[in-house]
């Protein structure tokens, strides 16, 4: 057998094992740990760990931070359905935020290595940021809410996502992985995100992540407007407003 054929055979075998793990997760909606997957598929634990790590990094599986169990990731329609309660609960607070700021507010969740817009409220100021619509996806971190989510993730998980999105980031204001890491660190230091000229040119957004009971980020809310309307003092004021409004209902 030539080297090309051997390489193709090995690649197919690797793909098959990954698909078997994914199928096992789908058969167990309550979740499985690494030993459970290894027993179910008669695989070595070290091999299972390598495969499941890749599946999580690529967005095909998720790990529950509280239980440590792995589950198959939901597709986009399932994510939107599961987040319906978040939209219903947070939409009134977002309406108040947009009324008070005059600017557009956004509710964002994570899907794999991307951010997904779940809801948008429009403000009263004559110039609104409307490029991001409900259902819009982009690499996690290029928008203010996505950056807030990314920065709130465990460091290893955040770093893996940045590396995964490195090539895609260049399409957003020539963003690089190293610049994204700086933005993530700045967000962690101040407690809220601020990013401009990335997702939309000439626009700056401020975002705050909302954590679940285990401290894991599930959704984030942001406010975006043209750069001239977002000096540093107003950025802090808006971050505090988001915290105050969504904190009362989160």
Image (cartoon, rainbow, N blue to C red):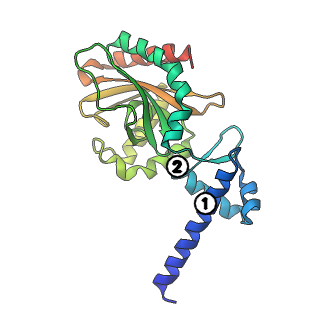
Q: Is residue 92 above or below residue 16?
A: above
Tell me the residue that label 1 is attached to: 51
| Image position, residue 63 (x, y; %) | 63, 45
Q: Quadrant of residue 49?
A: bottom right
Left or right: 241 in relation to 36: left
Residue ID at (72%, 66%): 43
Q: Observer-nearest residue: 189 or 177? A: 177
| Residue occupying the point 36% across, 53% down | 167
Q: Residue furthest top?
A: 100
Q: Residues within 10 Å of mark 1 (few under 14, many from 20)?
A: some
Residue drawn at x 54%, y 38% as measured from the top left: 153
| Quarter where residue 182 is shown | top left
Q: Is residue 7 visible?
A: yes
**Of callouts 1 and 2, the N-terminal one:** 1
**Residue located 49% across and 83% down the image:** 5
**Distance Cα–Cα, label 1 vs label 2:** 12 Å
Q: Residue 108 at x, y = what percent?
A: 45, 31
| Quadrant placement of the C terminus | top right
Element type at mark 1: helix
Pinpoint residue 36: horizontal percent, then vertical percent.
Answer: 75, 55
Asked if disc 1 and disc 2 are in contact, CB closer than 8 Å, the reply is: no
Q: Is residue 143 left or right of residue 48?
A: left
- Say if residue 151 shows up in the picture: no
Q: Where is residue 220? Give x, y as percent.
A: 48, 28
Disc 2 target residue: 59
Secondary structure beneath dot 2 equals loop
């Amino acid at each position: 057998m030539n080297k090309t054929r051997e390489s193709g055979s090995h690649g197919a075998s690797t793909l098959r094992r990954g698909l078997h793990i994914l199928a096992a997760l789908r058969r167990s909606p309550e979740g499985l740990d690494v030993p459970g997957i290894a027993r179910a598929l008669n695989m070595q634990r070290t091999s299972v760990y390598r495969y499941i790590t890749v599946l999580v990094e690529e967005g095909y599986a998720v790990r529950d931070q509280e239980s440590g169990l792995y589950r198959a990731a939901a597709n986009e329609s399932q994510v939107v359905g599961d987040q319906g309660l978040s939209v219903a609960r947070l939409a009134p607070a977002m309406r108040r935020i947009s009324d008070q700021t005059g600017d557009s507010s956004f509710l964002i969740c994570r899907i794999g290595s991307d951010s997904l817009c779940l809801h948008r409220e429009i403000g009263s100021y004559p110039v609104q940021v409307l490029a991001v619509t409900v259902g819009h996806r982009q690499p996690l971190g290029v928008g203010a809410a996505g950056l807030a989510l990314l920065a709130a993730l465990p460091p290893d998980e955040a770093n893996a996502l940045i590396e995964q999105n490195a090539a895609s980031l260049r399409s957003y204001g020539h963003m690089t992985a190293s610049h994204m890491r700086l933005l993530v660190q700045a967000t962690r230091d101040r407690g809220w995100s601020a990013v401009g000229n990335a997702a939309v040119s000439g626009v700056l957004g401020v975002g705050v992540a909302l954590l679940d009971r285990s401290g894991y980020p599930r959704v984030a809310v942001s406010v975006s407007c043209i750069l001239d309307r977002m000096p540093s003092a107003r950025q802090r004021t808006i971050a505090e407003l988001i915290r105050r409004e969504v904190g009362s209902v989160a």
